Amino acid sequence: MTTMVLAYDYTREEEKRIIRAAKNAGIKLILCNLLESPLDYSDRWDVDAAIIRPVSMFNAVYAASYFESMKVLTVNPSYTILYAGDKVLTYSLLRSANIPIPRTILSLGDDSLYAAAKRLGFPLVDKPPIGSWGRLVSLVENEHQLTTIAEHRAMLPSKQFRAHILQEYIATANADIRCLMVGDEVIGCIKRIARRGEWRSNVALGARVEPYKPDSELIELVHKALTVFKGMFLSIDIFEHKENGYLVNEVNGVPEFKGFIRATGIRVEEILIGKILEKLRR
Amino acid sequence: MTTMVLAYDYTREEEKRIIRAAKNAGIKLILCNLLESPLDYSDRWDVDAAIIRPVSMFNAVYAASYFESMKVLTVNPSYTILYAGDKVLTYSLLRSANIPIPRTILSLGDDSLYAAAKRLGFPLVDKPPIGSWGRLVSLVENEHQLTTIAEHRAMLPSKQFRAHILQEYIATANADIRCLMVGDEVIGCIKRIARRGEWRSNVALGARVEPYKPDSELIELVHKALTVFKGMFLSIDIFEHKENGYLVNEVNGVPEFKGFIRATGIRVEEILIGKILEKLRR
Amino acid sequence: MTTMVLAYDYTREEEKRIIRAAKNAGIKLILCNLLESPLDYSDRWDVDAAIIRPVSMFNAVYAASYFESMKVLTVNPSYTILYAGDKVLTYSLLRSANIPIPRTILSLGDDSLYAAAKRLGFPLVDKPPIGSWGRLVSLVENEHQLTTIAEHRAMLPSKQFRAHILQEYIATANADIRCLMVGDEVIGCIKRIARRGEWRSNVALGARVEPYKPDSELIELVHKALTVFKGMFLSIDIFEHKENGYLVNEVNGVPEFKGFIRATGIRVEEILIGKILEKLRR
Amino acid sequence: MTTMVLAYDYTREEEKRIIRAAKNAGIKLILCNLLESPLDYSDRWDVDAAIIRPVSMFNAVYAASYFESMKVLTVNPSYTILYAGDKVLTYSLLRSANIPIPRTILSLGDDSLYAAAKRLGFPLVDKPPIGSWGRLVSLVENEHQLTTIAEHRAMLPSKQFRAHILQEYIATANADIRCLMVGDEVIGCIKRIARRGEWRSNVALGARVEPYKPDSELIELVHKALTVFKGMFLSIDIFEHKENGYLVNEVNGVPEFKGFIRATGIRVEEILIGKILEKLRR
């Protein structure tokens, strides 16, 4: 009998679906609540695969690396979660694979911030390397606002929040395309459209979603991303730029998929479990 | 003519030595002060190699990933700096390669902390995943102290500081062995002995250093570590356990080597430059 | 008809009791949820009194000062909440009134920390100026532990947490006496006894409480404290020192009284409402 | 011989001037470096006055309260430094004395933020209760920016930074008037004019200063402020509103006066020492 462990901190709809899908597939699923269970490097885990689902990015990375050290198939590996979870690492990885990204400049100190802004011109987008649900992603219309953001960011306690990722603001009618990959297959795409009064297209910020039919160019791009991020379960956010075509803006290594299911009806959790079983059989 | 870029934030003795060694070797060295220079993903860098030296771990990772995206030989790569810079990732990687580590338990929530401590018994060592110079590495003698540390750690603003790495306290007369690897060679080892009144053997905490002659077992261990951490420039800290032999305790992907030079007379920076040139020629 | 406003952020048992008591007394009570209501300095508040009850100390101080600016009888005034809410201000105020306190040294920098510890000797108690429910109140048994606490405290982001209040550890069988004052009357006292395995006698940390009959010396001390802290509703925590007698350890300007009621049966909220009405009539 | 203590953390030009002035006046001045000296509540300080000068607001408050507890004339008292150091307390105190302030709304939770902004209209000014040199004082031109600031402020670790003081933006050609009070006398005023490209008139942000001759209305206003803030050494910042006349915007209880001296030639430190001696003789 196949045994898997689900590493989680909070049980969202996604985790409940995975638990159900594993049960339906006849898998023995061990629930590992990371807030309650010590992870002992001397333990032996007699499991075939680990599904990594914490909300906290760091807990996800740590749990993934722990189960990797046990030589368990880990979905996703720590590498994938780390490089997708930090936007600087994401852009570097995409760029190294010649995947188009929005015009992006990294500023690691206040002295380089205004020089970077000058290169891009206003309005621009400023965001820190980490963070979910669009939080701290800021539209900056002039130098006063850049100063305001710089002063606030300088007081955030974690070094990672003090790095500035500056980007061209892309007029896309405040929408983006999210593609979901399971195994090495694009299982579907959705379009996310920002709610009125909000320019960010995050579902957590009220965006509505609708199914989206990808063309072959988009699918090729997403496959290219998979080769550098690795992993078996990714969501990839893409802007459609009027002149420059598709631009990859974000990758997520522990994707939420509640909104995706609502828009497409595709049972993500079942495909995920299926693909893991397939991989284990190989 | 070979061109290299030195990415740094502060100029310590180590960076000054590297600048001198590069000059002596006839290399054109571009100084990239990360606090002043925007890192533009649209730029082309016509350099052969990037030497990554920021004091800040995150700046080091970001600079490394940026130069990797430019397809420049990066010493060290972001992967190495990341997995060495975070102690959870370090122990996971070591464990996955069957390299012996101190008895270690990871606790990601207060509920698992006391259970983990019970398994290890007191005294134990509690440390967060990130941090340099021994900071926050705590000797915990009883449950009151564990509570004190847990309460303080819970108020630290970065999630990474809230993870607890609990370890057996190893009675090694408050000393450890530091091995320096350049290219794929162990260029020397030192012993670090804690100053009186301090149990941690960090030079930043006043430890004295002396040269140390490694045996073949130690050298083999360090080579094994290199295969998983990759990179070209690592320091590896090792405890000598009475019963369990050598245990790898820490890996550093942007090693300081001022103290090493003082103890051994080995010109680290010249070997480093030489090894990079060698690699470029291959 | 008397009108009062209750300023709160969360509705604990205490606030529910106050709401009921006000209703029973025929008072019109306006509920002001501080998280939802803007406090506009241009507004007029046609109320007779404001009862300040936020859990957050700063919200309590801000709400109190706002209603004071409206010339409303404010229970407690911002001054009382501030000087009771910060333990350095508390000890200074007590000391200025010649009220006995535990042997206390304030350290505002790491350089003075070890000198202060040397004066007191180990074990000692180290706590920051702000904080409730005993949090961060640390028993320090030796210099290693002091270093551990100093390193952690130095990384806490608020300046107030970086100040160290060092005190003699008082062997009181881990108990203290809490006196509750309403108007200018001591309405009762309880003894708080730490749960097994915990030396701090905070109810939030599991302490049990029992009624306690104060003697005249204790009552006199508490009245003395009232003259400097002012206000109409205070809880005062007192140690009984074998040689030095009663020592005031803490004052609370927004006291919780759920545990007090359980131990004594005294209806605090009714007395409070009564005393405010009495004061308004004068 | 008169003895005074100077409590400080860093020695700026202001502190050097005070040291010199005390010496010239024949005063025995004890230098108390707060980062190095433990403040022991059991000590006796045989001094006549304490001059409180730390850069850190909390260190200033703590030092003031400590010396007050020793019954020493303290310039300024903790009360003054606290109520001037926190802008919510400042506005409440000014308002309670019927001193005109800019149109101001306090928001203690995100739910009240947009309601407050709606009342004021854009552009508006948003600032936290604490902070010096204009830091985090933000000009907010639209709702997107308000969201950006709210998201950043929510991640600042200290509760005090999460309170929002919202104010009308006053078009004053980016200038304000600073009045300096020593004893109970206005010793002079300056006008601070923001540098080009900056709307805030803080000297730390590059503002230039020029002497300013106050009229009787301004002087009366400043005296009114002194009656509520108490203390012997205050700077008071005032906007001149086209329709509403003088509005007190800020009070400082540990004023810097380097720029004031440069603009006016008035020897602030000598007047300060003189006024303290005068007070001691009374």
Image (cartoon, coloured by chain):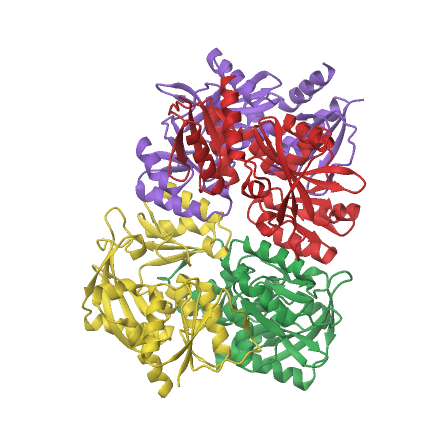
Chain colours: A green, B yellow, C purple, D red
Please state if B161 lies on the left or on the right of B274 as rendered.
Answer: right
Q: Residue at x 63, y 55 (%)?
A: A148
Instruction: Quadrant for the N terminus of chain B, please.
Output: bottom left
Q: Nearer the viewer, residue B222 or A118?
A: A118
The spot of residue B128 in percent (x, y) is 41, 55
Name the residue furthest front.
D265
Does residue A245 sit above or below B55 in this rendering? below
Q: Nearer the viewer, residue C59 or B227?
A: C59
Q: Nearer the viewer, residue C1 or C223?
A: C223
Give the quarter of the image for residue C257.
top right
The spot of residue B186 in percent (x, y) is 26, 74
Instruction: Quadrant for the C terminus of chain B, please.
Output: bottom left
Q: Nearer the viewer, residue A139 or B78?
A: A139
Does residue B59 sit above or below B205 in this rendering? below
Give the quarter of the image for residue C82.
top right
Name the residue furthest bottom.
B282
Q: Is residue A154 visible?
A: yes
The spot of residue C91 in percent (x, y) is 47, 27
